[in-house]
Amino acid sequence: MDWFPLINSLRIAAISTGIVLVLGVFAAYEASKLPRAVKGILDAVLTIPLVLPPTVVGFLLLLLLGPRRPLGAWFLEHFQLRLTMTWWSSIFATAVVIFPLLYRTARGAFADFDETLASSARTLGLSNTWIFWRLRLPLCRFGILAGTVLAFARALGEYGATSMVSGYTPGRTATISTTVYQLWRTNDEALAFRWVCVNLAISAAVLLAVNLLERKPRPGRGR
Amino acid sequence: MALVVDIEKQLALFPLQVQFEAKEGMLALLGASGCGKSMTLQCIAGIQKPDRGYIALDGRVLFDSKRHINLPPQQRRVGFLLQQGALFPNFTVRQNIACGVRDKGKRKAVTDALLQQVHLEAVADKYPGAISGGEQQRAALARVLANEPEVLLLDEPFSALDTHLRFQLEQLVRESVRQLNRPAVLVSHNRDEAFRLADHLAVLYRGHLEALGEKHAVFQDPRTVNGARLTGCKNISPVERIDSRHVRALDWGLDLEVSGETAGITHVGIRMHDIRPAPDDAQAPNTFLCKTVEEVENPFSITILLQPEQCKTMKTIGMELPKDQWCPRPSCRVQLPPEAILLLRDSEDRAITHQRGDRSQ
């Protein structure tokens, strides 16, 4: 059995989750400071990829990144770089699809944060940067971590947008999900079933991890 | 050394409009919940922004809407102690206190000294979630003191504590304020606590100050119905003026002699412990025969609810006596001494009253 699809899926999921972790937490933090009305609109805009069919996301990405589209053409001209049909093209696809998952959970975690802690810290002369890194992030870490694991799991399972942006080339852009589809199409049920089992095992492990994170008690908060 | 506050802010239900000056020692803002007292502290600390006004500390401007000055909390040097302490849950007690120390070189020495001062050495390496409420408040106080604040703001710091813990922490706060020798503002709805800790009192009602002055003066003459209630006066009745020294208390049906000018007075009040039983043949002013409606026993005193004979309403007057000075009887002659009767104005007239030249401006 050729393990390339597993390695490819894992690296795409890991990199896109890493990027989205930074972007999602940053966006959630900035959004939490906005007035309520603006926040509502921003929430809707940033959550749209969650409810769009992945094929629509893929379509929109191709409109942007395709070799004859604005961004794609620019990269091709200046860097001789094709943004689509490579293994890392899938990172764009999965990142867009999983962004709302992280943004939403991080927003929820920040909303639960006790603002009197930040107020006290400010009156003690501690900077907003200090408050973010030493109070807000550590105290919201379980929520953010749960969101990260969930996003990673979703990234592993991404099919629609990925297949449109990266296509399916065995040994180059194949992921677990595109491989399963391809094997089913070519009637190789036995091999497809093995990949399904691999996928099930990973998903189960990830969801167990989420459960453990959610059950973990938060550090004492005072009474 | 003084904190000068003169701010306005529109709140949901009423405008907040306060003006006061706090010198060394403690000023207590006494008010019911939701009267704007916590908001006032938050404006001083820079956590909330007033719509208009001016806040200065020793001449250093913290906020001035005219000059568009609004220092961030970090630069105000304000020690803010909250009801729940707001200790950082992911830091130990020692680390929490160390967070407050400005001079990093002295961090360890200052932290150790403060841990000793608030008697927390034993739990220094525990997290806030693992210590008691009283210990949490002591740690929070130590953290504030570590910061060497130029003014101390105390937002109901004792209200989450049991009585005996409260007393201990009060003592610690009193000592700390004395040592610090800086202005301190306490926000409270508890008149006993405010009286014990503060030198000056301000009574806040629906966003405006109704009385401001030395604490004894405010308790002796709370000026408004609301001030009287907040300073713990339980017997209050609307009045009709008879002449310059007499009023008719409508709730009790009593004509009372009073010791001050009655013009403009809408209510009178008398504290429960100022009413005393009088001998049957007494000729003293304001002596009345009353029915005993009910006796309520307190731990160390007894409260007798009385109804004057002339009374047409169901309203009663409460009298509080030491237990040994009362034996149950169906009726009783009591005296309401004229000098103990508080002359009050309705709280609605919104006049800001400054008492006994305490304000220097």
Image (cartoon, rainbow, N blue to C red):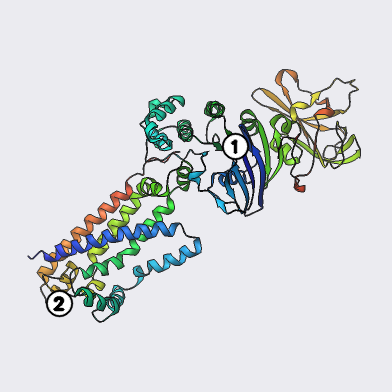
If the image is split into quadrants, where does the N terminus of chain A sit? bottom left
Q: Secondary structure at mark 1?
A: strand
Taking the spot 11% from the left edge, 65% from the top edge, the residue there is: A4
Whether residues under marks 2 and 1 lie with C-beta atoms below 8 angstroms apart, the answer is: no
For image coordinates 75% across by 45% down, the residue present is: B347
Image position of A54 (left or right of B107): left
- Identify the residue at the far bottom of this view: A68
Q: Is residue B154 above or below residue A94?
A: above
Q: Disc 2 designates what residue?
A: A185
Which quarter of the figure has residue A223?
top left
Residue topped by disc 1: B185
Asked if residue A208 can be seen in this view, the reply is: yes
Residue under disc 2 on the same chain as residue under disc 1: no
Residue B330 against residue A54 in the figure, above or below: above
Residue B288 in percent (x, y) is at 86, 28
What residue is shown at x 70% (from left), y 20% (from top)?
A: B323
User: Looking at numbered disc 1 in the image, what kind of residue is underneath it?
Assistant: Val
Q: Residue furthest right?
A: B243
Foreground tag (2 vs 1): 1
Subunit bearing disc 1: B
